[in-house]
Amino acid sequence: MEGLPEGIDSKFRYVLLVSKRAEQLIQGAQSKVKSRHAKPTRIAMEEVEKDLIKWQLTAPVEETTALTE
């Protein structure tokens, strides 16, 4: 693979997307692509590269802490 797939802004995000999709495949989800690979990680990589996995960024959730003084 040369570079990142279009729409992926960092290597870290790419790894997160692939690992989460691979875990779904391991848990029994159907593959969205016919692949010559047998390993879930490689299948997930193909799906992400072909933009078959839908994802979106959400705003971070602000945590509230109770400080007592």
Image (cartoon, rainbow, N blue to C red):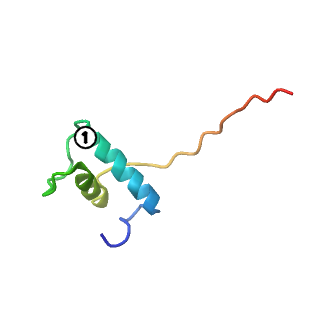
Of residues 62 and 56, which is closer to you in this image? 62
| Residue 44: image location, x then y, percent | 27, 52
Query: Does residue 21 sit above or below 63 in this rendering?
Result: below
| Residue 6: image location, x then y, percent | 38, 65
Point out the image quarter for the C terminus.
top right
Q: Quadrant of residue 37?
A: bottom left
Q: How many marks?
A: 1
Which residue appears at 37% of the width and 71% of the height?
A: 3
Q: Quadrant of residue 12?
A: bottom left
Query: Does residue 5 sit above or below 60 in this rendering?
Result: below
Which residue appears at 35% of the width and 65% of the height?
A: 5
Instruction: Specify the amino acid type for callout 1.
Output: Ile
Point out the image quarter for the N terminus.
bottom left
Which residue appears at 29% of the width and 47% of the height?
A: 22
Asked whether, in this view, residue 43 is left or right of residue 4, the answer is left
Q: Which residue is mark 1?
A: 26
| Residue 17: image location, x then y, percent | 38, 51
Query: Which residue sits furthest right?
Result: 69
Asked whether, in this view, residue 44 is left or right of residue 57, the answer is left
Which residue appears at 20% of the width and 51% of the height?
A: 39
Query: Does residue 2 sit above or below 9 in this rendering?
Result: below
Looking at the rendered structure, the secondary structure element under dot 1 is helix
Of residues 8 and 28, which is closer to you in this image? 28
Mark 1: few/some/many CA within 10 Å (<14, 14-19, 20+): few
| Residue 8: image location, x then y, percent | 42, 61
Query: Which residue sits furthest bottom?
Result: 2
Query: Does residue 30 sit above or below 8 in this rendering?
Result: above
